[in-house]
Image (cartoon, grey):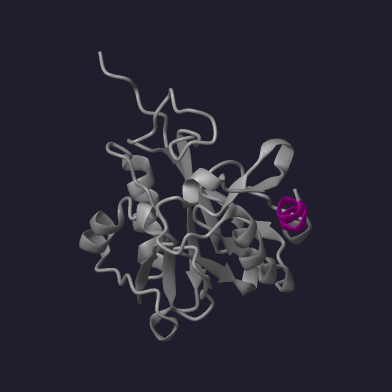
Amino acid sequence: MGTRLRPVTLQEIAPGLWRWTARHPDWESDAETDSPADWPPEVGSVAYAAPGALVLIDPLVPEGADELWNSLDELVAAYRERVAVLTTIRWHRRSRDALVERYGASTSRARRALPSGAEPIPIPRGGETMVWLPAHHALVPGDRILGGPDGELRVCPDSWLRYLSSGLTGGELREALRPLLDLPIERVLVSHGEPVLADGRAALARALES
């Protein structure tokens, strides 16, 4: 008998803002601590009802997740003027192509092409473009900011930066992330680990100092 999939459901964080988690098919159970493969099996995705559009950030819809597909269909029906799929980092393309095929979604992160209410924040030399949702004071990072223990945040391990041609170091990454503290961050909706849903700026400041 095959393994029964755990139902994947949307969690409404605030009116017009949802998050869900799903098991990533490439997760490795025996990954070495702080190696590039060291992340929890469940990864997070975000849906945001922007003015006139539905924005899906780093979406993963696993095989057989019919309940999740139904929920997304309902959101798209409610915000069918436009669907935009945004990818923070190239490793998070996940179900992008399937969503483009199903909904005719756009995929550009260019500022001029984004729906109102979703702002790109490129991380210099970091190979990542985070998404800022000002209506919800919510920051959506990819791999550079992770959920840590006890509801905290942490900066990704140095090993996660080795593929970058920029040669960015962990210390340099922390400096590149510091301008984020100018934002009134309340929520940090991470892809890896548990999100921070309150006092996100303070949690980020602690992560940058650790």
Image position, residue 108 (x, y; %): 34, 74
Q: Residue at x 39, y 33 (%)?
A: 27
**Splitting the image into 4 quarters, where does residue 113 fall?**
bottom left
- Residue 67 in picture, x, y percent from top left: 37, 41
Q: Is residue 10 visible?
A: no
Per the image, is 177 magenta? no
Rendered residue at 45%/64% (across/down): 166
Outermost residue, front direction? 167
| Image x and y of residue 191, in percent | 51, 49
| Residue that appears at 20% across and 61% down | 101
Q: Residue furthest left?
A: 101
Residue at the (48%, 28%) spot, across then down: 32
Instruction: Tell me: 183 left or right of 123.
Output: right
Q: Observer-nearest residue: 109 or 79?
A: 109
Q: Nearer the viewer, residue 161 or 11?
A: 161
- Looking at the picture, tell me which residue is in the foreground, 89 or 139: 89
List the single residue furthest toward the bottom.
112
Residue 124 visible to an observer of this rendering: yes
Residue 206 in magenta stretch: yes
Using the image, determine if residue 55 lies above or below residue 66: below
Question: In the rendered view, does 165 fall on the left or right side of 147?
Answer: left
What predominant SS class does the magenta segment belong to? Answer: helix
Total numbered circles: 0
Seen from the viewer's position, the closer of residues 171 and 210 is 171
The location of residue 65, given as percent across then percent down, is: 33, 39
Horizontal arrangement in the rendering, residue 171 relative to residue 40 (left or right)? right
Magenta stretch bounds: 203-209
Location of the N terminus by quadrant is: top left
